[in-house]
Image: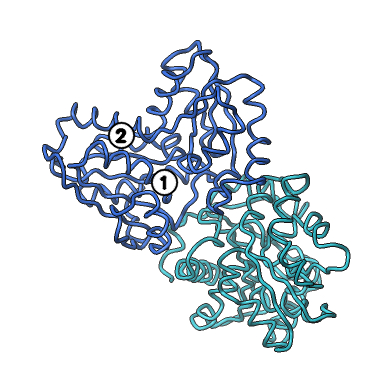
Chain colours: A cyan, B blue
Amino acid sequence: MSLSKNDPIGIFDSGVGGLTVASEVMKRLPGEDIIYFGDTGRYPYGSRSPEIVRKFALQNVGFLSRLGVKSIVVACNTASSVALDVLREKFPLPIMGVVEPGARAAVEATKNGILGVVGTRATIKSGSYNQAIKRLDPKLRVIAKPCPLFVALAEEGWTKGEVAKLIAQEYLHSLKQEGVDTLVLGCTHYPLLRAVIGEVMGRGVGLIDSAEETSKELKELLKKENLLNPRKEGGEYRFLVTDNPEAFLRVGRGFLKGKITKVELVEIERLKGEG
Amino acid sequence: MSLSKNDPIGIFDSGVGGLTVASEVMKRLPGEDIIYFGDTGRYPYGSRSPEIVRKFALQNVGFLSRLGVKSIVVACNTASSVALDVLREKFPLPIMGVVEPGARAAVEATKNGILGVVGTRATIKSGSYNQAIKRLDPKLRVIAKPCPLFVALAEEGWTKGEVAKLIAQEYLHSLKQEGVDTLVLGCTHYPLLRAVIGEVMGRGVGLIDSAEETSKELKELLKKENLLNPRKEGGEYRFLVTDNPEAFLRVGRGFLKGKITKVELVEIERLKGEG
C-alpha cells in the first residue's frame, strides 16, 4: 500500500457524533478530502464488549483502507479507548483517536490538578482517559464517571429542561463533591448537553471537547508523515453509513451546514473480510 | 425441510428483553426444548430503520432455522412490527410475533374503548399495534406514544426514583389526558418500569404485557400445526448471543433463575447467508 498526499482522510464513528470532529478537521484543513463513515447499523458502541467493538473497528478501518484513505481518525471515544492498539498493529497507515488529544487538552487546562471524565460505560471501564492523563502527568487526580443516559437524552433531543438537569445532577454530583476544575466530555454526543452539564458543574469548571484538539494533532501527524495535502482549499467530502442515511443527513446538517448534501448507504456485509 | 414435534422452539429478540416471553413459554410448555437467540451485538433495534431490522430478523430466523427449530417466536416488538410478513414469506415454518397477542389482550381488557400503546420509535411508527387492534375491533380508539428513554432507564437500572417518575410523567401525560383505561407495554423492556408507569397512569389503568398472551397463542399454534411436543416436562434450553455472554447471563438470571446457566457466543458472521 502506498499512501499519497492527495488521498482522503478517513474518519469513523459509531454514528453521527464524530461529525463534531469532522467539522473541526474541515475548518483546520480545508484542502483535505474526507471520507466519513458512520456505523449507524451497529450503533451504539458504548454499551458493547471490548471484543466486539474491536472487531467492528477493524472492519471499519479495513473498509476505509480499501477505499484508499491515507490516514484514519477514530472519532469515537469508545473505539479509541479499546481498539486503537489493535488497529495500529494491523494497518500500516497513521491512525489516531480522540482520547489522547482530549487528555492533553484537559491536562493543559486544569489548575487544581483534579480532573473529571464522563463517557460511556465502555470508555470509562477501559480506563483510557485515566491512563492517557497519568502518562502526561502522574500527579494529577482523575475521577471518572459513566453517564449512559446522556446519549439517550441527546438523541431524544431533551438537551434542556428538568429531566436533563435532574439526570445531570444525579451523574455529576460526585464529581462536583470531589472538586474537579476540568471535565472531559469523553463521548461525542455529550457536547450536545454542554449547557446543562455546564450549569450543573458551575462556572468554575472548564469543559473539554476533544474535537478541536484532535484536528490540531491530526495536522501535526500528517505533517510529520509527509502526507499533508498541499491544496489550501476545495476539499471534497463523502459520507457513508450502514443504516438510515436520511436520518444521518437530517442530523448531520445541524453539525455541518452546507458541507453535507448526500449520504450513501453501505451494506454491512461489505465490511466483512477484515477483523 | 421437515418439522418434528421433538424439535426445539426458536425465540429471538434483539437482546435480553425477550426472556420475559421465554419464561412464560417455559411455564406453559415445560416439555418443549427452546433455543433463545439474543442479537446483543446489534442491539437495540428500536431506533433502526425498518429495512435493517428486516435484514437482521431474516438473518436471525435463517440462523435458528439452520439449527433445526420447528417454529419461531419473534419476542421483540420492533421486529414483530416491521418484519413478520417477510419472515413468513421466506421461511416455511410457523412464525409468530408479540404484537398480535398483546393487541388481543388489550382489546379484551378495555372497558371504555380507549387504548394506549407505548413502545420504541420504530414500533410506534410502524402502526402495528394500531392495525392489530383495529382489525379486532374497528371502533376502538388507539393512542400511541414512543418512549425511547424508557429502554435507557431500564438498562441503567433507574426503574424507581425521581428521574424515572419525571420521564414517565413527561411521556405519559398525553395518554392520561385522553383517558385511556388500558395501556400496552409494547417493548419487552418496559415491564421493568411497570411500577412507575402504573403509578403515573393511576390505579384505574390496566397494563398489558404481551409475554403471557404470547405463550398461550404459541401453544394454540403448535397444537394446530401438530407440532406440540408430547413430553410434559424436561425441556432443555440453549441461549445464544452475538455479544457479551457474561452480561446476558448476569441479567438473564434475574429473569429465569436456575433455568439459565450457560450462554454461548455466536459470531455475527455466522448469521450471514440469509437476508
**Picture coordinates of residue B59 (x, y %)?**
35, 49
In which chain is the residue bearing label 1?
A: B
* Image quadrant assignment for residue A85: bottom right
Q: Residue at x 34, y 32 (%)?
A: B214
Residue A226 - label? none
Residue type at mark 2?
Answer: Ser
Q: Which mark is residue B55?
A: 1
Give me the residue at 62% from left, 64% from top.
Answer: A146
Asked if the residue under mark 2 is in contact with the one under mark 1, i.e. CB atoms within 8 Å, the reply is no
Farthest residue toward the left?
Answer: B230
Name the residue that disc number 2 marks: B215
Residue placed farthest to the right in the image?
A: A203
The picture places residue A251, in percent across and down from the top left corner, at 69, 49
In depth, the one of B72 and A62 nearer the eye is: B72
User: In the image, residue B265 lies at what x, y percent?
Assistant: 34, 63
Residue that appears at 30% across and 48% down: B62
Q: Quadrant of the N terminus of chain B?
A: top left
In the picture, measured across the screen, residue B258 lies left or right of residue B137, that is left
Q: Secondary structure at mark 2?
A: helix
Count how many numbered circles sit on residues in the image.
2
What's the distance in space between the residues labelled 1 and 2, CA to CA? 25 Å
Q: Is residue A234 above or below residue A169?
A: below
Chain letter belonging to callout 2: B
User: What kind of residue is marked 1?
Assistant: Lys
Image-based side of B117 in relation to A111, left or right: left
Q: Quadrant of residue A28?
A: bottom right
